[in-house]
Image (cartoon, rainbow, N blue to C red):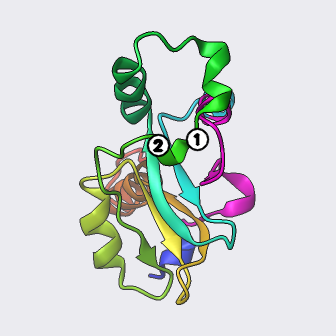
Amino acid sequence: MKIAFFLTPKAECAWVSDSSTVRQAIEKMEHWRYSAVPVLTGDGIYDSTLTEGDLLWFLKQHPHLRFDETGHHSIRDVERRRTVLPVRIDAEVEDLLALSVRQNFVPVVDDRGVFIGIVRRTRILERFYAEAYRGRGGEGI
């Protein structure tokens, strides 16, 4: 089984540029209802993942910052509390599984580090659940 089978392409998922403001990141996460988004460089290289927790800690460190002022602060200034590792599209599915244990989604990159999409943990679980119950009389998903 190939990682591409599980892939949600870049065009179908939310991400933010490393030049985005805190406000832009918050609004994108709110719109997509995501608790974390990949951060990409101007060249499309996967840089990191920004989480709601990262943004909350940033706001805690700036207690006098009003929401309308978040448009003046770059996400580059927001410390990442977790390292979310990507997987290469040509990696083994076992590598994907190992990362998905610790991450809600796994960013997928090509051999140059360019972001091409994500694999959601729920997609992996759905597939393996369906496989486990196929032919056993179980309903599956």
Circle 1 is placed at which residue position?
74
Q: Nearer the viewer, residue 69 or 30?
A: 69
Does 48 sit above or below residue 42?
A: above
Does 129 sit above or below residue 3?
A: above
Name the residue: 44% across, 30% down. 55
Q: Position of residue 108 (x, y in %)?
A: 51, 70
Q: Nearer the viewer, residue 21 or 6?
A: 21
Tags 1 and 2 touching, CB below 8 Å: yes
Circle 2 is placed at which residue position?
77
Label 1, residues with CA under 10 Å away: few <14, some 14-19, many ≥20: some
Q: Position of residue 37 (x, y in %)?
A: 53, 46
Q: The magenta stretch spans which residues?
A: 6-28
Three-letter code, disc 2:
Asp
Horizontal side of 95 relative to 115 (left or right) equals: left
Horizontal side of 62 relative to 136 (left or right) equals: right
Does 111 sit above or below residue 114?
A: below
Q: Position of residue 111 (x, y in %)?
A: 52, 89
SS of the residue at dot 1? loop
